[in-house]
Image (tube, grey):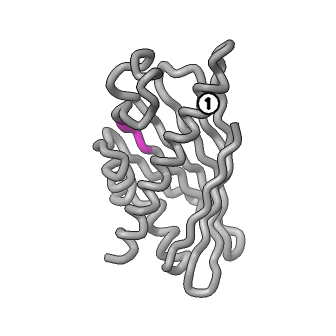
Amino acid sequence: MKITHTHRFDASIEDVWTMLTSTEFGRARAEAMGTEAHEVDVDLREDGSRAVMLRADVPTTSIPSEFRALVGRELAVTYTEVWEPPGGADHVGTFAVEIAGAPGHVAGAIGITPDGDATDLLATGDVVAHVPLFGAMIEKAVGEAVQKALAAQLEAADAWLAR
């Protein structure tokens, strides 16, 4: 299943870039999803690239009730962004969502682009579940949960930038 999410930040690309690749905002992302991050790691590499990794136990209330019995009360989620070295005005990278014990994952591309005093974010990806007969239903449920979590994180990002 394909997912696409766009968002406009009323902030400069420098401010958005700093926020997205900060440990403190990593913790705020987890809080926006209704959990506490067990681990937030930001790797600032010599070539200017950055990797952001967030691990958290996420309540299963974000997925349809018919799937909760299959996964328990919480999902152990690892979210990773790997940003390429800066090469112009834009920042681009990849993202991945892995759920421990789940038969699938989410992966795709992410980028931020300046537009005057604002910054546009675009995230596109694929939700894949390797489950015969039920794969499409699981992909839809996971895709909707990822979109909901991303919307909550971006709302937290707007509040973070407005501070």
Give me the residue at 46% from left, 36% from top: 78
Report x, y in % for residue 138.
58, 26
Report x, y in % for residue 111.
64, 61
Q: Which residue is mark 1?
A: 139
Foreground of the two, 90 or 4: 4
Give the main secondary structure of the magenta stretch: strand
Find the magenta span and give its range: 54-58
Furthest toward the bottom, the residue is 116
Q: Is residue 154 above or below residue 56?
A: below
Foreground of the two, 81 or 64: 64
Residue 91 on the magenta span: no
Q: State left or right for residue 127 relative to residue 33.
A: right
Q: Amino acid at mark 1?
A: Glu
Q: Is residue 39 above or below residue 60?
A: below
Foreground of the two, 160 or 41: 160
Give me the residue at 49% from left, 41% from top: 79
> Can see residue 84?
no
Give me the residue at 35% from left, 41% from top: 39
Q: Locate the N terminus by quadrant.
A: top right
Report x, y in % for residue 59.
34, 34
